[in-house]
């Protein structure tokens, strides 16, 4: 399958906690300074830790790591870029720009949501948890040698709240202000009943130079290199083709505990291709060195080229224990023709996942049923007593099935044309008033029922074929619409589509990040992830319950209740997921034996490293 849209996610679950570490976290909540923070106050690493357990602190520096994008966020694209501003709505932001900026804190990959100090050496949290006082490191510097101060951090968070990408603005809703008490002290104030994860989100935002932006607008696309303070700076690039990032060899933060064993490559290079098959050929020709494979057909049939056979290219299947989120065709309910949930369920019945998985994807995937897939937040069976307490106020306002077994996509006979499911789809369409006239399905208004499936990857066309064929059997005039990456993003951000594919990537500790996906506010916010236009008071309330949860058990209960109501709404045609990362790379690298459970992706390139001996051997073959 083509690469889904993957955003920064956290893993699922929480490990055993030692008593001294719990005391450290509780002290920070009581007003004492602490070296880290997390959503529920738990920290694995003590104040004097040397490095994260999952890195190789002795990893050598050097070499190049090159890849094609497999993760995108905000205004980024998998296929192109025309701007070095990756934090606004305008333009196509370059991949990798986050590596050029330092943040207040850094997430630990082996904890669900804990963060430890980078620019901030400590944080003091007020007893009411509404004021966070960060003490900045005096050695923090921008790449030009100028000092990074609390004024820079305050400017950054306030300008992102005012002029950043709409998704950033939504997630900063509960941040009232950021102020510099002095050069070394940043005070961030949050609203009452603020979302649990907003302080963590703020601590992970990029810090820009206030002086740099005093002479230029923040919210404009540009190919001028912004002044950063991170482990890399922008090197050579050609818009729409490639961009290189050069390691800052005298980086001020290189020897901090959160950075030991990370950012080991001298150069990280992103290559951009408009076509995935062409991109694969580029990999076989060594135009880039690392590839995470998202197309099951290619993984199953095309890794037989000479470099694989003679060992110059290695293949690995790495585990993915993070919540996979939910990938599917999202149905734009803002359009009248999709308002009736019976119409949307008919579309679900028309998709034969079993045939598609067997025929197109070589049986590599499992069926998605929930936006919280691969986590303990997936609802199953009848609601628990705690779930019922949250759901009962909405009885009569939500479908009755919410109080029973959650909706699960039907299982087909795998023929590609399951007659029982097509009859069910036909019945649902008829009940919704979409009858057949002259062999064409028409809306209650008498207009033909047409569906356009918007996509930006040609390799995804085969996955649409069976669904579109079955819809044709039902009299529905369905067709794919393939557009370029720029037009695709513009149409999706403006909600100018009937149906399109997206992946919702859930964290292990979802909070304010739920708003861009599910709430009525996000349904009306252009550029949000709420592609289906979900605007349901019950879902709004359950999102707030999840955000306000005081324990992980309460959070899990709220998310399961939310899952039930979302699935009852038939807002999407669920697709598929897998719990592994198939990767291939030219044999010039090493990575830790056990990758961190809660980190996004495979840890590449952040915690991988260049192996000069392996590279010499590979190049000599």
Image (cartoon, rainbow, N blue to C red):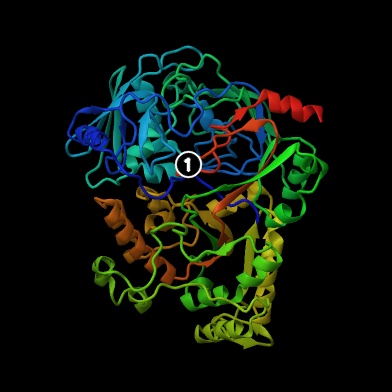
Residue 190 percent location from the top left of the image: 26, 39
Q: SS at mark 1?
A: loop
Residue 191 vertical placement versus 100 (above, below): below
- Residue at 55% across / 56% down in the picture? 502
Name the residue nearer the viewer: 584 or 563: 584
Crowd class of label 1 (few under 14; some 14 to 19; many from 20; radius 10 Å): many
Q: Is residue 511 left or right of residue 326?
A: left
Residue 237 percent location from the top left of the image: 67, 27
Residue 48 percent location from the top left of the image: 33, 23
Name the residue nearer the viewer: 45 or 369: 45
**Residue on which disc 1 sits:** 599
Residue 240 vertical placement versus 280 (above, below): above
- Residue 291 in which image quadrant: top right
- Residue at 64% across / 35% down in the picture? 82
Q: Is residue 193 left or right of residue 316?
A: left
Name the residue nearer the viewer: 55 or 505: 55
- Residue at 25% across / 65% down in the picture? 386
| Quarter in which the C terminus is drawn | top right
- Residue at 62% across / 86% down in the picture? 436
- Residue 315 in which image quadrant: top right
Residue 605 percent location from the top left of the image: 58, 33
> So how many labels did they put on this image?
1
Residue 361 vertical placement versus 350 (above, below): above
| Quarter in which the N terminus is drawn | bottom right
Name the residue nearer the viewer: 463 or 227: 463
- Residue 497 appears in view: no
Q: Is residue 27 left or right of residue 464?
A: left
């Amino acid at each position: 399958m083509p690469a889904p849209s993957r955003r920064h996610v956290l893993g699922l679950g929480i490990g055993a906690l030692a008593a001294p570490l719990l005391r450290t976290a509780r002290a920070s909540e009581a007003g004492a300074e602490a070296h880290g923070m997390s959503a529920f106050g738990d920290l694995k690493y003590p104040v004097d830790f040397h490095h994260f357990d999952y890195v190789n602190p002795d990893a050598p520096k050097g070499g190049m790591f090159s890849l094609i994008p497999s993760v995108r966020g905000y205004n980024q694209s998998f296929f192109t870029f025309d701007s070095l501003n990756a934090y606004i709505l305008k333009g196509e932001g370059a991949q990798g720009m986050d590596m050029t900026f330092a943040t207040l804190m850094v997430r630990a990959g082996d904890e669900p949501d804990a963060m430890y100090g980078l620019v901030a050496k400590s944080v003091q949290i007020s007893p009411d948890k509404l004021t966070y006082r960060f003490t900045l490191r005096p050695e923090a510097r921008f790449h030009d040698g100028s000092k990074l101060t609390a004024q820079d951090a305050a400017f950054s968070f306030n300008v992102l709240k005012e002029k950043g990408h709409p998704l950033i603005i939504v997630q900063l809703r509960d941040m009232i202000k950021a102020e510099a008490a002095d050069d070394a002290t940043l005070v961030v104030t949050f609203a009452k009943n603020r979302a649990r994860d907003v302080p963590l989100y703020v601590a992970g935002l990029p810090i820009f130079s206030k002086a740099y932006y005093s002479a230029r607008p923040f919210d404009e696309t540009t190919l001028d290199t912004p002044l950063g303070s991170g482990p890399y700076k922008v090197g050579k690039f050609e818009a729409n083709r490639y961009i290189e990032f050069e390691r800052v060899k005298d980086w001020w933060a290189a020897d901090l505990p959160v950075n030991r064993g990370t950012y080991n490559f001298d150069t990280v290079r992103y290559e951009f291709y408009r076509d995935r098959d062409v991109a694969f050929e580029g990999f076989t020709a060594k135009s880039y060195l690392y590839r995470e494979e998202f197309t099951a057909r290619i993984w199953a049939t095309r890794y037989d080229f000479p470099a694989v056979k003679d060992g110059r290219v290695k293949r690995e299947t790495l585990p993915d224990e993070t919540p996979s989120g939910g990938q599917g065709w999202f149905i734009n309910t803002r359009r009248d023709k999709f308002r009736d949930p019976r119409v949307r369920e008919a579309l679900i019945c028309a998709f034969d996942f079993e045939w598609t998985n067997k025929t197109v994807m070589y049986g590599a995937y499992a069926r998605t049923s929930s936006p919280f897939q691969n986590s303990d937040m997936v609802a199953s069976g009848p609601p628990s007593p705690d779930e019922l307490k949250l759901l009962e106020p909405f009885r009569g306002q939500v479908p009755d099935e919410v109080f029973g077994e959650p909706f699960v996509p039907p299982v087909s006979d795998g023929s590609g044309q399951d007659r029982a499911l097509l009859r069910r789809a036909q019945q649902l369409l008829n009940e919704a008033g979409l009858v057949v006239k002259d062999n064409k399905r028409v809306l209650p208004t008498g207009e033909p029922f047409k569906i356009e499936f918007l996509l930006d990857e040609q390799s995804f066309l085969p996955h649409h074929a069976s669904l579109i064929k079955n819809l044709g059997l039902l009299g529905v005039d369905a067709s794919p619409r393939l557009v370029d990456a720029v037009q695709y993003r513009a149409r999706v951000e403006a909600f100018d589509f009937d149906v399109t594919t997206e992946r919702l990537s859930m964290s292990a500790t979802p909070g304010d990040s739920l708003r861009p996906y599910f709430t009525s506010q996000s349904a009306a916010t252009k550029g949000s992830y709420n592609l289906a236009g979900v605007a349901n008071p019950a879902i709004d309330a359950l999102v707030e319950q999840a955000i306000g949860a005081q324990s992980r058990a309460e959070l899990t209960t709220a998310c399961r209740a939310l899952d039930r109501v979302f699935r009852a709404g038939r807002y999407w045609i669920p697709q598929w997921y897998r719990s592994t990362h198939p990767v291939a790379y030219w044999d010039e690298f090493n990575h830790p034996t056990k990758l961190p459970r809660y980190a996004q992706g495979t840890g590449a390139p952040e915690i991988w490293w260049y192996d000069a001996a392996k590279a010499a051997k590979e190049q000599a073959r």
